[in-house]
């Protein structure tokens, strides 16, 4: 009899512990995904100094997709290279950071469908030409396809590469004369030039290696989050919300 009572008590205790810790069917809905991003990559993600919040195309897409699919998430705007590291280390569930979908990256990441297309351009002070790169240093951003592009053309143009963590550090280095030019995604530097924030010009002709931007998870992980993102992206493409977000930032 005592044994039966003890057993009954144990069952009650386990059941209430499950209720208190939130175990059970609703678990999935309550997960808060950790999403990393860049921190100075306008108009995709940048600090709105008037509110102290990160805003931009990627931030709005993330919010719209999460609302459409009913999941919770927390953004961490730490920079591009830190975001890559966090996803690979399993500290982040995913990243959205104006990230170009490349075959090489597909060995380490699974990507969503693309939501924007862009390629790289070379940027310098007014009057500098491609012939002026010879014997000089060109700025590129760590872990980006801009860096890969710079590596692929450095011998042809005769420059060496200085790497920077952030796009803003890269622009400052060119403005200060530390580097003669930098490599950046066309839409991002175009936005900085248009908004009058950066007094530089695009000196290359067409954007190189134009490809889609995608949301990314670590390869083989978080398939359910990737599925939700793609489902939400499809919906916001169809219902005009994505168009509205792009238009808000001038696209
Ligand atoms: N699109 C570029 C890349 O994927 C740059 C991204 C970024 O700097 N946030 O490498």
Image (cartoon, grey):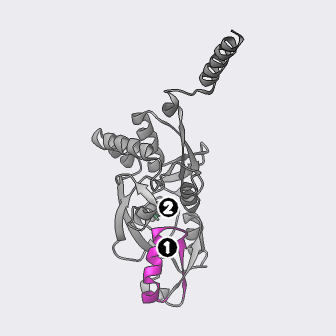
Residue 84: image location, x then y, percent: 54, 59
Residue 139: image location, x then y, percent: 54, 75
From the image, which quarter does the N terminus lie in? Answer: top right
Q: Name the residue under label 2.
A: 196
Mark 2: secondary structure: loop
Q: What stretch is highlighted in magenta?
A: 136-158
Residue 197, compared with residue 222, is above or below; it is: below
Residue 154, compared with residue 142, is above or below; it is: below
Residue 16, compared with residue 38, is above or below; it is: above
Residue shown at 35%/54% (left/top)?
114
Is 77 situated left or right of 207 in this image? right
- The question of residue 141 being in magenta is answered with yes
Is 96 situated left or right of 119 in this image? right
Front residue (pair 202, 100)? 100
Is 79 situated left or right of 148 in this image? right
- Kindly tell me whether mark 1's CB lies below 8 Å from ligand 1: yes
- The question of residue 138 being in magenta is answered with yes
Residue 216, compared with residue 67, is above or below; it is: below
Q: Mark 1 points at which residue?
A: 147
Residue 133: image location, x then y, percent: 49, 86
Q: Which residue lies furthest to the top in this view?
A: 1
Q: Residue furthest left?
A: 238
Q: Can residue 123 be seen in this view?
A: no
* Residue 122, quarter of the rendered image: bottom left
Mark 2 or mark 1, which has the lower sequence index?
1
Mark nearer the viewer, 2 or 1: 1
- Measure the alpha-carbon separation of dots 2 and 1: 25 Å
Residue 45: image location, x then y, percent: 51, 52
């Amino acid at each position: 009899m005592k044994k039966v009572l003890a057993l009954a008590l144990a069952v009650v205790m386990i059941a209430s512990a499950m209720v208190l810790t939130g175990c059970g069917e609703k678990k999935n809905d309550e997960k808060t995904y950790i999403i990393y991003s860049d921190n100075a990559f306008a108009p995709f993600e940048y600090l709105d100094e008037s509110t102290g919040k990160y805003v931009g195309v990627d931030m709005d897409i993330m919010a719209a997709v999460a609302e459409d699919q009913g999941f919770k998430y927390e953004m961490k705007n730490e920079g591009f290279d830190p975001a890559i590291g966090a996803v690979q280390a399993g500290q982040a569930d995913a990243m959205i950071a104006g990230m170009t979908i490349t075959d090489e990256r597909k060995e380490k990441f699974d990507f969503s469908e693309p939501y924007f297309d862009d390629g790289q351009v070379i940027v310098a002070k007014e009057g500098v030409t491609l012939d002026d790169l010879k014997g000089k240093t060109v700025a590129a951003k760590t872990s980006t396809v801009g860096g890969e592009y710079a590596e692929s053309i450095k011998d042809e143009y005769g420059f060496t590469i200085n790497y920077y963590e952030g796009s803003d550090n890269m622009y400052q280095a060119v403005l200060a004369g530390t580097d003669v030019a930098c490599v950046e995604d066309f839409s991002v530097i175009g936005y900085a030039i248009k908004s009058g924030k950066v007094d530089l010009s695009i000196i290359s002709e067409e954007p190189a290696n134009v490809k889609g931007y995608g949301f990314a998870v670590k390869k083989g992980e978080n398939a359910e989050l990737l599925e939700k993102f793609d489902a939400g992206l499809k919906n916001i493409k169809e219902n005009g919300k994505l168009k509205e977000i792009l238009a808000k930032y001038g696209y």
